[in-house]
């Protein structure tokens, strides 16, 4: 049992949610207290609502008892955003997972937040449509989690991240009010746009109970290129050239030389030695792909380019992508500790970021490897160390602060797609000045005056 | 002279803005009190700042005297949003019109709010780039006005409206604080997205002093089709078919039969008789356009389609578009009074909207003509009447309320791109429920606690 919640609240929640709708046993609660940041905290109870009315009522009940509420998808986020550090109630949306409607003529889908991204994509395929956000965790993360974190993925370079692909939201505020923003239209100038404000707010402003998603037609064909470079600088320069020309790639992924080595030696990918690698993809009608490939190949080529291989068919494409896919598991094998930060800079500054990270790695004697969504300037900077060695860990922490400072100096942002959560919260003042933070706190207060929704996240105290 | 402002405020503003930076003569002020809604109000003074520091200081000065502030681009909006109905100070950004930077590698431009949309586009052309918002007033409206109203235009169907094409903003809040949201990156998950909240807020939350705009490569080629239909229903059904298939048109414009007649008989366009007309355009590489044209032609064809003409070259394209361009001037000639509302519905509901408007026109004996950006479901519904005839005017007003009710019932919004301003303010509760309006008021309070910024706009009292 959970002794920390007032007994009248527990009774009221039990009445509201039914026998199986409220988890109180510690053995059950423990599964709702962590995320992929490896942080953990035990919630006092877990609610499994099935309707928006239950969500509305549980927020009102928690509010009357001043109990914290942390919304939860499937806990795949990497920042601690879904870890209930102030205890209280975790609201898991796993039973609110219905795909309410697909309307191909309007290019929209209406969903509940607990629907898995992968299940949505599968249902859309029959209509020749897709929803662009494609985080690596797509098969087992929820749309609600994607909304909370403004999730991205490789396709964002052409199709946008979550915030670019949502038309309307229904949500419950921290005051226990049901609000609806937007409509199933691709244009709107009717009052304040609060949908996009909720997207990326990590459950700190409201609990989303329904979303109207903007869909995109699936391109009938795609073509992949793999380009190898002498060093990271020449690959980074190629990224800037690729994004400065007219054909926007549908994916543009970067791996530095150490990632190439790991993918080959640990991941078993069939790859020559190279200082850096780009995976470049175009999609569209068959008629345009030859021209697109020519344009991308021309931009990818230049000083330091060692080879460009094309995948004429899907089987070869899979083989080229195997290197990228082998990477994440391989990374886990080489160091017990890893800080993975998804910083983002203007595309033209990628060469400066890569060079700056190299300088920091050398000065702090810390291994840092970089890969990621280069077309958005969104690099995953991985600092590798052994947490058991206090000295190594301290150097990695110091290096991290310097990486962030470099990113900000280059006009970038702390996070491109993972969010802030707990992991970057205390770095936020590096990126956002005091007056702007005050405006964000005022927004928080407007939606959640008692500070009940996911307390301790995003905004530093 | 302006007697309504306190003398110490006038002196302080004169010191701040210099001899030519503050207009006090009524003959000068009158030009800053109207917009294209034909509403008018005389401001007590007009400020012409040249720097963000001046804007910051003038807001602080006005705040200490509790004087209203209305930001102004070039007054081309249609809703009264820039009419200073509470008097006070109009801040015209005409002298803050610098194009601060174009960075093709990052696909961004950094601008001051007073820059004309048309001047921006011209400067971008040399780089093979454009900024998607293209309201009819583009040559003489400002980027700041586009931001304030979330302006759209024909290209929005493929490239999005203003809100989809801005990466970062710097602004002065109603509390006189300088705030900065976003960065020159196409991805971001770093705190709340307040840029998009300011876009479309019509100067009620903050005064934008700098914007980082997201640019798009200019497609090298385009191809136009003109399709004629027996009646509006068959054209509306074709729009739904066009938007349900994979090739997104770069423009998709609709004119009903009366518009076709006016364009021909009054505007002099070379057009056969038809019940409705669609202008359909694709853009992209030459290689893909033939396939795109085939797909669009196939979707446009169907029951009630009378003819589809293609424009093989730019000269023919101009000729096909002439009908659409002849329309707005022609409309002005047939009725002294016109209410032009830019409602928006899900694309699949366009047939229902057009049918519903027909029923209302008949019942209220009011001439209503429709044209607009059909690919977004964004129709300009024009109610025509003679204001001198009280009975006609009353019927038009009644018809307008019924049009709005129809739009809401179809899941649409009151405005697709013009905004709310004064014109639709009192209809907002039709579209937005009380709890959601309360959330919007809380946001307004967070940015502008004293209610000084463009009072009386968007939110009903």
Image (cartoon, coloured by chain):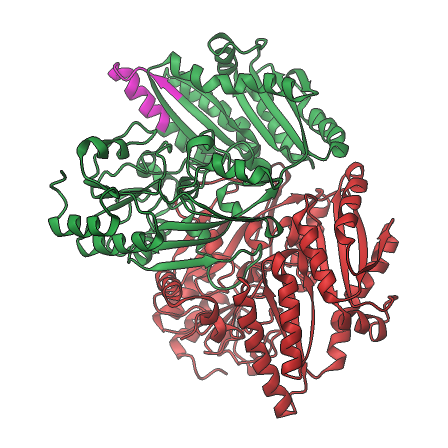
Chain colours: A green, B red
Residue in the image at 76% along x and 80% along y = B333
Of B10 and A118, nearer the camera is A118
- List x then y, in percent, for residue B161: 60, 54
Q: Is residue A391 magenta?
A: yes
Residue in the image at 53% along x and 81% along y = B41
Look at the image and tell me whether residue B286 can be seen: yes
Identify whether B117 is placed above or below A377: below
Residue in the image at 40% along x and 74% along y = B67
- List x then y, in percent, for residue A414: 41, 36
Of A441 and A217, nearer the camera is A217
Of B65 and A461, nearer the camera is A461
- Answer left or right for A125 relative to A175: right
- List x then y, in percent, for residue A158: 60, 37
Look at the image and tell me whether residue A410 can be seen: no
Identify whether B369 is placed above or below A321: below
Quadrant of the image containing the C terminus of chain B: bottom left
- Answer left or right for A297 relative to A98: right
Residue A78 sits in quarter = top left
- Answer left or right for A223 relative to B290: left
Q: What's drawn in magenta, residue-wise?
A: A383-400
Our reading of the magenta stretch's main secondary structure is: helix
């Amino acid at each position: 049992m959970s002794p920390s919640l007032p007994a009248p609240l527990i009774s009221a929640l039990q009445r509201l949610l039914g026998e199986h709708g409220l988890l109180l046993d510690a053995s059950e609660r423990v599964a709702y207290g962590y995320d992929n940041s490896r942080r953990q905290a035990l919630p006092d109870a877990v609610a499994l609502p099935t309707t928006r009315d239950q969500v509305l009522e549980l927020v009102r009940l928690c509010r009357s008892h001043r109990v914290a509420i942390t919304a939860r998808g499937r806990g795949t986020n990497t920042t601690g955003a879904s870890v209930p550090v102030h205890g209280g109630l975790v609201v898991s949306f796993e039973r609110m997972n219905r795909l309410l409607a697909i309307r191909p003529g309007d290019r929209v889908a209406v969903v509940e937040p607990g629907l898995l991204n992968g299940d949505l994509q599968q249902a859309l395929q029959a209509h020749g449509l897709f929803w662009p956000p494609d985080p690596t965790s797509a098969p087992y993360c929820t749309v609600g989690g994607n909304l909370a974190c403004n999730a991205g993925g490789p396709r964002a370079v052409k199709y946008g991240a979550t915030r670019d692909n949502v038309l309307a939201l229904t949500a419950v505020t921290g005051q226990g009010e049901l609000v609806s923003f937007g409509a199933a239209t691709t244009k709107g100038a009717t009052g304040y746009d609060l949908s996009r404000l909720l997207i990326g707010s990590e459950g700190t402003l409201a609990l989303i109970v329904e979303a109207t998603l903007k869909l995109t037609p699936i391109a009938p064909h795609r073509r992949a290129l793999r380009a190898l470079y002498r060093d990271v600088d020449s690959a980074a320069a190629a990224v800037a050239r690729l994004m400065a020309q007219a054909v926007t790639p549908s994916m543009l992924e970067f791996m530095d030389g150490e990632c190439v080595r790991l993918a080959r030696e640990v991941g078993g990918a069939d790859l020559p030695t190279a200082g850096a690698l780009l995976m470049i993809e175009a999609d569209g009608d068959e008629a345009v792909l030859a021209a697109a490939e020519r344009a991308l190949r021309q931009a990818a080529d230049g000083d330091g380019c060692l080879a460009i291989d094309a995948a004429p068919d899907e089987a070869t494409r899979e083989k080229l992508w195997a290197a990228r896919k082998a990477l994440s598991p391989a990374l886990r094998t080489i160091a017990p500790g890893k800080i993975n930060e998804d910083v983002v800079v203007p595309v033209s500054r990628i060469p400066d970021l890569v060079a700056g990270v190299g300088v920091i790695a050398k000065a702090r004697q810390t291994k840092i490897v970089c890969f990621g969504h280069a077309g958005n300037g969104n690099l995953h900077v991985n600092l590798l160390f052994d947490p058991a060695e206090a000295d190594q860990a301290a150097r990695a922490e110091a290096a991290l602060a310097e990486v962030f400072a470099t990113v900000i100096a280059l006009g970038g942002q702390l996070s491109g797609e993972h969010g802030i959560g707990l992991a970057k919260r205390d770095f936020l003042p590096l990126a956002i000045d005091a007056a702007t933070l005050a405006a964000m706190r005022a927004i928080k207060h407007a939606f959640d005056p008692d500070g009940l929704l996911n307390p301790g996240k995003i905004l530093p105290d």
